[in-house]
Image (tube, rainbow, N blue to C red):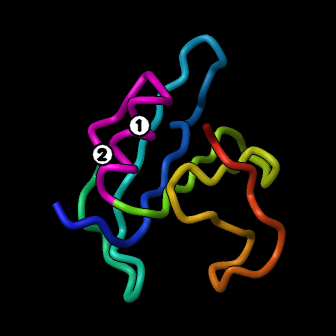
Amino acid sequence: MQRFGIVFLAPTYPCRPDDLAITGYWDRGDPPEILEQGPGWNDVEEAVAWGRARAPKVMLRLGATSDTIYSAGEVPLTEFADGTGRPYPVWR
């Protein structure tokens, strides 16, 4: 599978800390186009692995604020799509 674009992962809402459910999708990037909707996960690492298999850029949001966003792919992500702004912490 050719890897390109970006994958977005985030909890479904309402989310409870003891019952985290993750949703996500693979996007072409430019121009934006959803290529595949993820199956949904209860395990963050499984969601990240799904994203990494599809795209070099993976954005993982674990909460409702910007300080809960992580860069989980091989290409580091920042606050702005052009690569400027605050870098997101790397998800290991």
- Which mark lies nearer to you, 2 or 1? 1
Residue at 59% in and 31% down? 14
**Picture layout, residue 36 above or below residue 46:** below
Q: Find the magenta span and give its range.
A: 38-54
23 sits to left or right of 87: left
In front of the other: 2 or 64: 2
Of labels 2 and 1, earlier in sequence is 2
The residue depicted at 70 percent of the width and 40 percent of the height is: 63
Name the mark on residue 19: none
Residue at the left extreme?
1
- The crowding category of the residue bearing disc 2, from other C-alpha atoms within 10 Å (few below 14, some 14 to 19, many at least 20), is some
Q: In x, y percent, where is residue 85?
A: 82, 76
**Residues at discs 2 and 1 in contact (Cβ within 8 Å):** yes
Lateral position of residue 25 relative to residue 70, left or right: left
Name the magenta segment's main secondary structure: helix
Dot 2 amino acid type: Gly
Residue 40 location (% of width, % of height): 34, 35
> Where does residue 55 sit, x and y in percent of width and height?
37, 61
Residue 56, percent from left and from top? 43, 63
Residue found at x 83% / y 68%: 86
What residue sits right under mark 2 in the picture? Answer: 38
Is residue 29 covered in magenta? no
Using the rendered view, name the quadrant where residue 4 is placed.
Answer: bottom left
Q: Quadrant of residue 27?
A: bottom left
| Mark 1 neighbour class, 10 Å CA radius: few under 14, some 14 to 19, many 20 or more | many
Screen quadrant of the C terminus: top right
Instruction: Identify which amino acid the numbered label 1 is placed on.
Output: Ala
Cα gap from disc 2 to disc 1, whole angstroms: 8 Å
Task: Name the residue carrying label 1.
Answer: 47
Q: Is residue 28 above or below residue 41?
A: below
Please count the marks in the image: 2
